[in-house]
Image (spheres, rainbow, N blue to C red):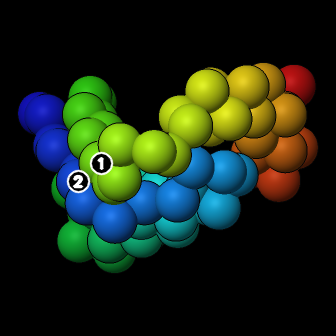
Amino acid sequence: MKMGIADLGCSSGPNALSVISEIVEAINATSNMLNRPAPRELMLYMNDLFTNDFNNIFASLPSFNKKTKARNGIQ
């Protein structure tokens, strides 16, 4: 199952990833509560002003991934 998530007013820094993280956690919690499998594929659409520098988002992905794994007890 696929699911799309659109953030049409996102920031261009690490806060954009924290919003997406909260949404993904809510999806997983709801799937568990309903005893349904979580979507296997998430498509993320991020859009805002053309002056935003999305390179900051991509540059912050490694540290965000590390923090997420640590929070979930994954090595």
From the viewer's perspective, tell me whether residue 24 is left or right of residue 36.
right
Q: Quadrant of residue 46?
A: top left
Residue behind mark 2: 6
Q: Is residue 67 above or below residue 58?
A: below
Which residue occupies 53% across, 34% down?
A: 54
Kind of residue sitting beneath label 1: Asn
Q: Disc 1 marks which residue?
A: 47
Image position of 27 with respect to 51: above or below? below
Instruction: Describe residue 36's horizontal placement relative to residue 13 as left or right.
Output: left
Q: Toward the viewer: 64 or 1?
A: 64
Could you say which is closer to the camera, residue 43 or residue 72?
Answer: 43
Q: Position of residue 31 (x, y in %)?
A: 29, 62
- Which residue is located at x 75 percent, y 34 percent? 60
Q: Quadrant location of the C terminus?
A: top right
| Residue 32 left/right relative to 51 | left
| Name of the residue lying farthest toward the front | 51
**Which residue lies most toward the left here?**
1
Image point (11%, 33%), residue name: 1
Residue 21 position, x and y percent, is 55, 56
For badge 2, the amino acid type reads Ala
**Label 2 vs label 1: CA separation?**
8 Å
Name the residue at 43% across, 60% down: 10
Q: Quadrant of residue 15?
A: bottom right
Residue 29's disc is none
